[in-house]
Image (cartoon, rainbow, N blue to C red):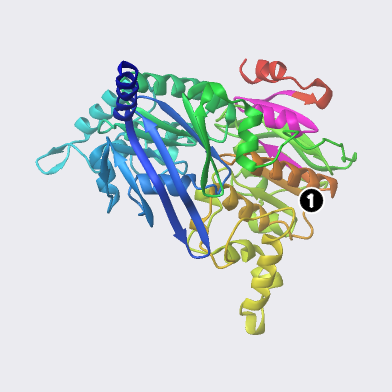
Amino acid sequence: MITQKLENSIKEKDQNNILLKMNNITKYYPGIIALDDVTFSVKKGEIHGVIGENGAGKSTLCNILTGIIRPDKGKIYWKNKEIHFSQPKDALNIGIRMVYQERNLIPFLTGAQNICLGDEELKWFINDEQAIYDRACKISEQLGINVVLNERVKYLSSSVRQMLEIIRAFIKQPELLILDEPTSSLTEGDIKVLFEVIRNIKKEGVTIIFISHKLHEIFDLTDNITIFRNGKSVFSSKTSDLDRNECIKYMINRDLKNAYPEVIDYSVPEKVLEVKNLQALPEVKDISFYIKKGELLGLYGLVGSGRTETAEIIYGLREKDKGEILYNKKPLNNNTTEKSIKEGLLLLPEDRKEHAIFNIFNIKQNISIPVIKTKLSGILGMINFKKEKEYAKHIADSPSLRLKYRSINQSLSTLSGGNKQKVIIGRWLEIENTTLFIMDEPTQGIDVGTKYEIYVLARELAKKGVAVLFICSELRELLGISDRLYVYRSGYIARELKREEFSEEEVLKYALA
């Protein structure tokens, strides 16, 4: 009798400790089940990790929790009471906040104005800018985040913008904070600061759902893990009861024996690109490097070290102050993006949302857009829609891309982050004269299985003789797939490393010096 009472007491305590519970949640879209009978719960005051491949159902889960979409079946409980969200405001009102992977800041407003947007301090019926700034400062100080708040967002780095999104979530104290890939654009130093902030938030009793494709972050930070695959919740346990290999197996339903494909050096002595004393102040101060035909060259450096700016100068998005760029032994002067594409010089940009995705277009249109004039035009220059569909499906279904989609006419906005990235890569795969492909943060915010596919694709391009410039903030990735590596520091090349010289300690010594 006493034992029974004790068991009942423990069950009741566990039940009372559940902040959020989703029972048998199902969500249908035409031709696909985004969530399939998912049951998921989060305890008060825990950090709960959610992982899974792109398209596994994580985004749909979050959209339901934040009131953006409604489930077709199932029930949601908040503090043991059934709830129904008819709009995002309903989720906000009970204390659910989310920081999205793709930033939603207004570029022409300051950091402080973005933080207080929709909840401004007023004075004589107009915004009190000083009060808005002071309030934003107070929240950032409480969270231990030190960023510029009086500068327009369009002038701020990706890492600062990410921090602003997190501060904005605390304009009203949340009970449940959902963080979707919050470290995807942060430096190692910023990540340490963020993790400290998250741990402090947990101490204050805030519950956190932490979504990340970086497994080492999941294991460093979370208390419990739930793994999604193909719209189902396939496994849930304490973080301490799992290891990395088990996680990967549950995520992709197969063993991934090696994190990176075999590195075979396909390079030849011929230089495709040579950069000499390049300068474009303030970010690029004096950069010199080269890349050979068939070589996969890595560029590593902290955010703001000048890597992306170098890539944009080469591609024709920025002007240089001085220096020389030789492309296929010819000077690259007054370059434009149109000239680059014609010459087989391609760029996968760092910020896919701002600079690569056409969200109002479907998959077919996003894939075919670079070759509309050259390959897909018909009578009187009109688009040959039959050719366009065949072309896009040929790329989408290719073994090298393995795109997950239900219709070639599907809106790009309905795809997961990893599949959006595949579409952007796919649009360049049939550019016949490609000699240089610049990939800037190509694996940012995507799962381990899709990352591997992109590594393989990059190595296949090198095998075909394409020079691949791979820019990445994930040092382990660069060490795993590069033939050679340059380390950036504050607008300069601090070190060149051949593969036999690779080590994390050696790279970080020069990147952080």
Quadrant of residue 202 in the image?
top left
The residue shown at (44%, 34%) is 162
Taking the image as drawn, is residue 321 in sight?
no
Left or right: residue 144 compared with residue 457:
left
Note whether 424 is above or below 441 in the view shown: below
The residue shown at (31%, 36%) is 115
- Whether the magenta-drawn stretch holds residue 72 is answered as no
Q: Residues within 10 Å of mark 1 (few under 14, many from 20)?
A: many
Residue on which the image places disc 1: 435
Left or right: residue 332 compared with residue 265:
left
- Whether the magenta-drawn stretch holds residue 470 is answered as yes
Region of the chain picked out in magenta, as a range:
468-495
- State the count of labels: 1
**Residue 480 x %, y %:** 74, 30
**Residue 435 x %, y %:** 79, 51
Q: Quadrant of the C terminus?
A: top right
Q: Outermost residue, front direction?
A: 1
Note whether 54 is above or below 203 in the view shown: below
**Residue 21 x %, y %:** 36, 39
Q: Nearer the viewer, residue 110 or 224?
A: 224
Q: Quadrant of the N terminus?
A: top left
Taking the image as drawn, is residue 417 in sight?
yes
Circle 1 SS class: loop
Note whether 497 is above or below 128 in the view shown: above
The residue shown at (54%, 47%) is 56
Q: Amino acid at mark 1?
A: Thr
Left or right: residue 13 compared with residue 435:
left
Q: Outermost residue, left direction?
A: 124
Q: Outermost residue, bottom direction?
A: 379
